[in-house]
Image (spheres, coloured by chain):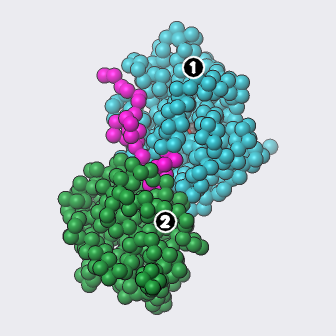
Amino acid sequence: MTITSQPDAGGHFGPYGGRFVPEVLMAPLEELEHAYAEARKDPAFHAELASLMKNYAGRPTALWRARRLSEHLGGADIYIKREDLLHTGAHKINNCLGQILLAKRMGKTRVIAETGAGQHGVATATVCALFGLDCTVYMGEEDMRRQRLNVFRMRLLGAKVVGVTYGSRTLKDAISEAMRDWVTNIEHTHYLLGSALGAHPYPLMVRDFHSVIGIEARAQMLEAAGRLPDTVIACVGGGSNAIGMFHAFVGDAGVALIGVEAGGRNLTLGEHAARFAGGSPGVLQGCYSYVLQNADGQIALTHSISAGLDYAMIGPEHANLADLGRASYVNCSDADALNAAMMLSRMEGIIPALESSHAVAEAIRRAPSEKGKVILVNLSGRGDKDIDIYRENLKELDGQ
Amino acid sequence: MANSRIARRFAELRAKNEPALVAYVTAGDPTLDATVGIVAALERGGADVIELGVPFSDPIADGPVIMKGAERALAAGASLRGVLDCAARIRAVSDIPILLFSYLNPLMRYGFAKLAADAHAAGVDGVLMTDVSVEEAEPYVASMRDAGLDTVFLAAPTSTPERLALVGRFSSGFVYLVSRTGVTGVRDQVSSQALPLVERMREHTSLPLAVGFGIAKAADAEAVGRLADGVVVGSAFVKLIEAHAGTPELEPRIEALARELKNGAMRSRMTAQA
Ligand SMILES: Cc1ncc(COP(=O)(O)O)c(C=O)c1O
């Protein structure tokens, strides 16, 4: 079976994706689609992006062989792709650099974004500071509380952070609010969406800007281990770090692709964000994909200890890869993610973001029974932003 | 649908040189029972067509007023089945055309074919979905038309001529023109984007054109009545519901606002004739 990673003209990956937005937004989406199609063909665009990725963001990122962790688990050989080492501390900057160049090409003077964990908001505020564009970031109040450090970072970078006070007060509501802003200010404003989600062309464009992760990692694996990994693991919120990692490996039939969703407290609707475990196809915020919803088609509330995975829908290309059986999706509980973060910190000296800890947890779970195999984990971000949550949950380490 | 209740109502009004008052309320806000009374009050005040909003958890095209209305309706337990039952109760006592106004997901979840049959049985006349673009419309339009329901689409100031042509082709009953780039909500004046849009849309369809988004006062209705066949008002009614739900004042106030708006719209034709 050959799997095409190119959506159709309407932005469909298999049946998923598309463009489900109010009529007013069709024009700016078409404008963006055309601008991106032009940029894609323009060597100057690629050159400028490559230069920023290298000199500003710090690419290529390292591939680290996690020897102590692998030996401790006594099975598979684990390699870690260090997206946490990028400027601003997570993979999100890859997409932001690509989109800010597009915003400039389109002559936009104002940028808006949503953020969950705050990493995308920080990356957006960063590129806006770099290019001198006005920046507003929408963030659910619950997320502002649990990712306080990032709220301040955004403000320090000159962005306006607007709290969203309704719904679940998390990522989903921040996206809705950003869409309302966009619909009102389309002329001068670019919506810098932060995951492989939403209406076409976002899932395609965001994937492309992150595909550098998998391209580098694939070459680095061949160089370091002389072979491709047996299994590639990434956490999946909307799906950007995972699809960026998977993209280069989709054609390698022997490489298993595993996405890890947030299993939250348990798998009762409202207590997790595992769309493949508890969801069904539906439409939310411009896109047709797997979504957590109730019997009346109302979008369900979600929970995850990690703000970045706490979202009701998964990106459309993941839905298609799952249907085709090319990627599989598992979930990891809050507790297992915390344990994985602790283990990676102690064994490798790397404090991961809580989102990324979900991917690490899956590697830890599989490694003992996969002796002789090679596992590649995408470490999408570093854990500084999560220190408060680690402190709250690892009380035995705190205090005198 | 050439002979639908919506088409007939617009034709009657056109014959009388009257603009239509199209009134939006979110069904189930504050309760489905209350909606039946609110719609009766709208009709007494002069509303010609009712847009019955299906509450949705994530209404990306709505401003705070209608968003809160949807939250109240969902908190009170409104479901799509409940909204259809509510429509049937309205239909039992009134001949006013009813258009379901919804986001896609609740209808998709219910199933288009089942929805079309059940909506028709409940006396609903048409469906409008805010987040279904003409590109994605075919399967849904076919199901609705098969059941004899009108499909109304939105046109916006940002729509290209190609898109306006498709909006005209997929719409029946009337076309809903979004008067401004923005979300629903009460504004100070009618957008200057409205007139050019009416003129551009006229080139693509002979269907009646109704203009909405931001219209709240008699003077706005009069301004829109000069341009278009219908005036759509939503947030102004939902605001009254927010302020007076559960009190005996609600229905009289709704009726009075509808009358004021309808009279405002009518004035547009008097001055036009003078
Ligand atoms: C470090 C990190 N990893 C992963 C995610 C999840 O997003 P995605 O699934 O788009 O990679 C986030 C989102 O905020 C994040 O900050």
- Magenta-highlighted residues: A1-29
Q: Nearer the viewer, residue A166 or B195?
A: B195
Figure check: B251 above or below B224: below
Q: Which chain is green?
A: B
Residue B137 covered by magenta stretch: no
- Please tell me which residue is depicted at 25% across the width and 67% down the height of the picture: B119
The quarter of the displayed image where residue B170 is located: bottom left
- Please tell me which residue is depicted at 56% across the width and 26% down the height of the picture: A42
Please state the chain letter of the residue tagged with numbered disc 1 in the rendered image: A
Residue A216 circle label: 1
Position of residue A339 measured from the top left corner of the image (x, y, whole percent): 59, 36
Name, please, the residue furthest toward the front: B274
Residue A229 visible in the current orientation: yes
Q: Quadrant of the N terminus of chain A?
A: top left
Q: Work out how far the residue at label 1 is from the one at label 2, CA to CA, in angstroms.
A: 54 Å
Q: Which chain is cyan?
A: A
- Helix, strand or loop under label 2: helix
| Left-right relation of B20 to B119 | right
Position of residue B120 measured from the top left corner of the image (x, y, whole percent): 22, 68
Q: Quadrant of ligand 1?
A: top right
